[in-house]
Image (cartoon, helix red, strand yellow):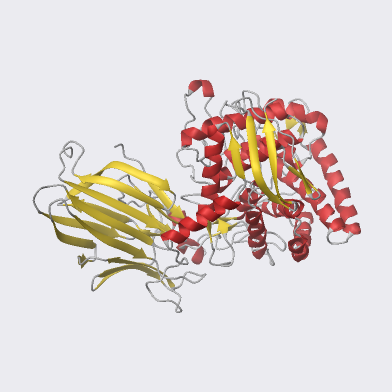
Amino acid sequence: MPRRSISIFDGNVFMVTDNSGDIDQSPTALTGFFAHDTRFLSTWNLSINGEPLQALSIDDRLNFETRYFLVPGEPTHYVDAKVSVIRQQTVGASLTEHLTVINHCPTSIDLRLRLEVGADFADVTQLGRDVTRQGNHYARVEGERLLLGYRRESFRRESLITSSQPAHVDEHGMTFEIRVEPQQEWSTRLHVATPSLTTFGMLSGQRRMDESITPSRSRQEIVQELDDWLNQAPHLECDYEPLTTAYKRSLVDLAALRYRPVISPELYLPCAGLPRYMTVIQRDFLLSGLQVLPFKPELAATALIGSAVGQGNVLDDFQEEEPGKLGSETRYGEAAAFEELPQILYFGAADVTPLWLVLLDEYERWTGDQTLVRQFEWTARRCLDWIDTYADALGNGYVWYQRRSPAGLANQGWKTSWDAICFQDGRLPDLPRATCEIQGYVYDAKIRVARLARQVWSDPDLADRLEREAAQLKQRFNRDFWIDDKQYYALALDPDGNQVDALASNMGHLLWCGIVPPERAPQLAEHLLGPKLFSGWGIRTLATDAARYNPIGYHTGTIWPFDNAFIAWGLRRYGLADHAGRVTQAILDAAPYFRSRLPEAFAGHDRHLTERPNIYPNACSPHSVSAGAIPLLLRTMLSLNPDGDNLLFDAALPSRIHNIKLLDIPGRWGRTDAFGRSR
């Protein structure tokens, strides 16, 4: 079987192995057993009589568990193997491996099993970087237990490895000398515990060393929780199998990515994506909350609560904190604990604050939960104050961003890579920058909060002011960002007011925000679905004629499923159902090539050049906002919109989909159904 990596995960605890279940030590590769931004196992290699194991088949249907069916030896000579091995690896609060050796011989057989074990306790944010570690590693044999650890001042991480069968334990692993009778089997249960941590990375004195960081759940509890999650979601009936399969895959991944963060253990928030972003990224869970609101409104509620916990109170250049601004990322690894990175609570995102306001209103429209909206009135007012003061760095009514932390992000919209915001000729604009989509989010936020102020907070003066400001922003934006000779919106403005003229997908977000005058929407649609941006598999992040275009550049030519889903939603808002249908169909066509699990991004090559969409090598998968893309595309196809205590729908389906039934859609109306047929 060809070598490939296998991932299992439950919340922010995950494991990446090769296709025999082994982990090879690597200072750069994202393989290992991880929790809370730390690699707790960097070596986990099994051999029999000195020979490695090779995979016959792999059962990885469950996100948290994989079974490997193996034989010893190299692929050239294991056809007549007399022994087979089953490894069942399960992650939850810890790692458990059930190891079974089966003797197929008519006589007994003596075997030497060796499990090499190691832990470098590397910070996931530093893998692949040349970093000098300042702490000390240690290993101790405690009877039949192996304790591996790393300590730097008060920061400590430890892995405790045990076996249910007797073993010879040394500082590098475990050895089992076993005899297996004819046609019989031998088995053991291996367990790796990660001791409890406090918020700032120290061992908690309140728990035993064999307790885990993450609250423990049994396998049955994990399965039952997933079943309950799926049963409570709307049921999809459709004659197009790629959609039904991708919909279920999305729901499963969104459930499995949830975890309880150390700073807010009462919440259940989705991690952003495996492997590099298995933590709280506020932008991602606000966007995924918005995407799945018609399906899982509780995810939106936790996103709102979780983001509000991290609202800024002071000016802090290192963390880029400002009063009223919402945080963007939280990390628990060594680099954050010692402020080598600002991400212990980082505020380097200019779009999170207006997106939170957008979700607050949309959540109330769907659920009618005015209690939560009243609870967050003060938070919302502080968000508005930040938008109008600190965010408006040049005093011209736009939200600007500029890195203040030496370890912070240069770009602070959703396209965070250093070269994502560029002129058509490849030049990078000076800072600060005002990207177009963030102004759209602000416009939408002010319109929406005006509604809440009038209907929930009983503050008509605030509502009137916000509506005036939104109208002024719309007029100003359409004057300053519209490029007359190219008939599309600038990607951004530089500090001198120059239009950053690269053709990019960002302008597609302006449609779902509603800041585009109706007469300009068809022109945007033609650009978005034109050959420079649309590959046939989806809309690229950057047009092919831009100097920095690269079909496998992170934000300079790849296709992001979540980006396409929001653009399709915006196209439908402006009545451009055919254009929205083309985007939807393209993403659905791509999904089966990724086993129905849409990755963070994939390559932007033209469809006529490739029989299948090409991978983006470093894409996260699963990825929360990519998982949310399918539900949002469903909402778009059915045009689901709340209207008071009623749900309105008006289906417009892509040509390959003939019938859709979405049953038990939750909302302020209770539960209701929506239907669609091709026209």
Query: Farthest residue in the left direction?
Result: 107
Compared to residue 655, the image places residue 142 above or below, namely: below
Q: Residue at x 20, y 51 (%)?
A: 102
Q: Is residue 185 visible?
A: yes
Image coords of residue 219 (percent x, y): 42, 59
> Looking at the image, which is closer to me, 658 or 637?
658
Q: Which quarter shows the C terminus?
A: top right
Q: Residue at x 44, y 66 (%)?
A: 216
On screen, residue 562 versus residue 111, left or right, reads right
Q: Residue at x 40, y 70 (%)?
A: 195
Query: Farthest residue in the bottom direction?
Result: 205
On screen, residue 490 versus residue 232, left or right, reads right
Q: Quadrant of residue 498?
A: top right
Q: How many marks?
A: 0
On screen, residue 652 versus residue 560, left or right, reads right
Image coords of residue 526 (percent x, y): 70, 25
Q: Quadrant of residue 139?
A: bottom left
